[in-house]
Amino acid sequence: MPVSSGARLATRTYTGAVRTIVLLGSTGSIGTQTLDVISSRRDEFRVVGLAASGSNVELLAQQVIEFQPDVVALARAAAANSLQKALYAEAERRGWSEGGYALPRLLLGPDAAAELAAAECDVVVNAVTGAAGLRPTLAALRRGTTLALANKESLVIGGRLVVDAAAPGQIVAVDSEHSAFAQALRAGRSDEVRRLVLTASGGPFRGRARDELRDVTADQAMAHPTWDMGRVITINSATLVNKGLELIEAALLYGVDYDDIVVTVHPQSIVHSMVEFHDGSTIAQASPPDMRLPIGLALTWPKRMRDAASPCDWTTAASWTFEPLDDATFPAVELARRCGRAGGTAPAVFNAANEACVDAFCDGRIGFLDIVDTISRCVSEHLADGHVPDEGLTLDSVLRADEWGRARAAELAGAMS
Ligand code: NDP
Ligand code: MG
């Protein structure tokens, strides 16, 4: 299999009616749903590159055989051999003879996804999980490609760096709430917007008091009531850290002040978010919880994709409820607001400490409440010493803050177990 580990990809020009897609994080929840959307629309899209970390080579091999990308990027170089074996096994399973299919070029190593993100294509879908998405996000933006962004962490931690690298409209949100904002914002002028109303399902522990959360397990936290997602975002939805990340994501994407974004709990996850205009009108975007709708919209933005997902059923009775967020039990959103206002490297520490704590919680080393308590402590320490404000922000300072937040949270978690 041809392998390249550092050289720029040879560029290939894709023009015409077919949109060419590079999909980063193809084996994850968003990645597989993106391929699901594309699979029934082969005349509209062509997948030219796939990237994954390498923990599920069987699934990746199925995707490669199915979509025939030109290039595959693997973060774990050691997984290359297993991928090759899985590819031959998958081709054999389908009864294909040797030579009956094209093997993709392979990019290997921690920078492989970023290298692929800089390849020529119409849309890069960044559905990698966590801070590892930052370099690919910057690479796609610098190349000038439309970025369908699921990996909110890269925008949150990169902050001004990512915003300044993006041309107007270059980032299209995949996150359902931010897709809802984009849709609702079409209803008025930007100077008519009063505030953004960010909806939250409330997660599996909605309605509980803080004391009732002390002993909850990772299995309980993984049981999300309305969405089926990857591990990190599911735990983040239980702690409300996800809503905190989304608050910062909304402020950065739409240039809205932190005072003008309010969070409301909407357990049915049908209204994906709302925009309130200065005449008192509120425009909501509603659809059953199905990520294929915002994924489809991000692939074809500003046009809509016909039948991307099922609409609401108005022939049966339904009720939608809204309630304020219990900030005393779920302090993650206010902590994120503090980090967002501080800007610079504060959101990177918020996210990095969280990623370390999610691992520690899932391994049974810390309790559920320790997650946000530990993030809060890391953020306070960082703001007191080491914080770099927006004006001095560089990729290096973001990466250093990320490394520090991860290490400090792991150290604090270690002292608890
Ligand atoms: P998953 O954990 O299900 O999938 C993550 C994907 O990223 C996998 O394909 C994984 O590969 C890949 N990956 C991890 N590290 C790297 C790396 N260094 N280089 C290349 N690929 C890598 O996550 P989700 O799909 O749930 O979430 C992805 C992103 O989308 C997150 O930022 C999340 O917050 C966001 N999001 C998700 C939603 C959802 O419904 N799931 C909704 C809204 C936003 P491998 O399988 O090989 O490990
Ligand atoms: Mg969301």
Image (cartoon, rainbow, N blue to C red):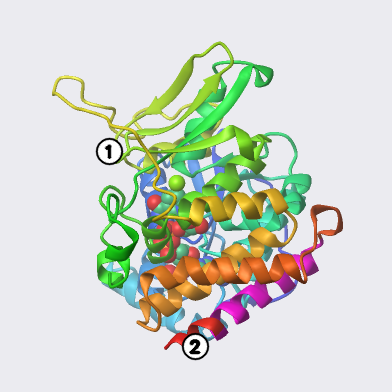
Circle 2 is placed at which residue position? 414
Relative side of 326 to 80, left or right: left
Residue 94 picture location, percent across and down: 28, 67
- Looking at the rendered structure, the secondary structure element under dot 1 is loop
Most extreme residue toward the left is 316
Report the front residue among 71 and 246: 246
Residue type at tag 2: Gly
Main secondary structure type of the part rendered in magenta: helix
Crowd class of label 2 (few under 14; some 14 to 19; many from 20; radius 10 Å): few
Up-down relation of residue 101 to residue 122 (above or below):
below
Task: Report if residue 222 is visible in the image.
Answer: no
Q: Secondary structure at mark 2?
A: helix
Give the magenta-colored segment's residue range.
394-411
Q: Is residue 265 visible?
A: yes
Depicted 292 relative to depicted 336: above or below: above
Outermost residue to the top: 279
Name which residue lies at 59% across and 15% down: 278
Dividing the picture into quadrants, the one containing residue 382 is bottom right
Which quarter of the figure is the C terminus placed in? bottom left
Between 206 and 292, the one lying in front of the other is 206
Residue 103: x and y in percent read 50, 69
Amino acid type, residue under disc 1 in the picture:
Gln
Image position, residue 141 (x, y; %): 72, 49
**CB under 8 Å between discs 1 and 2:** no
Residue at which label 1 appears:
268
Q: Is residue 405 magenta?
A: yes
Tell me what residue is drawn at x 40 percent, y 59 percent: 239
* 346 to the left or right of 176: right
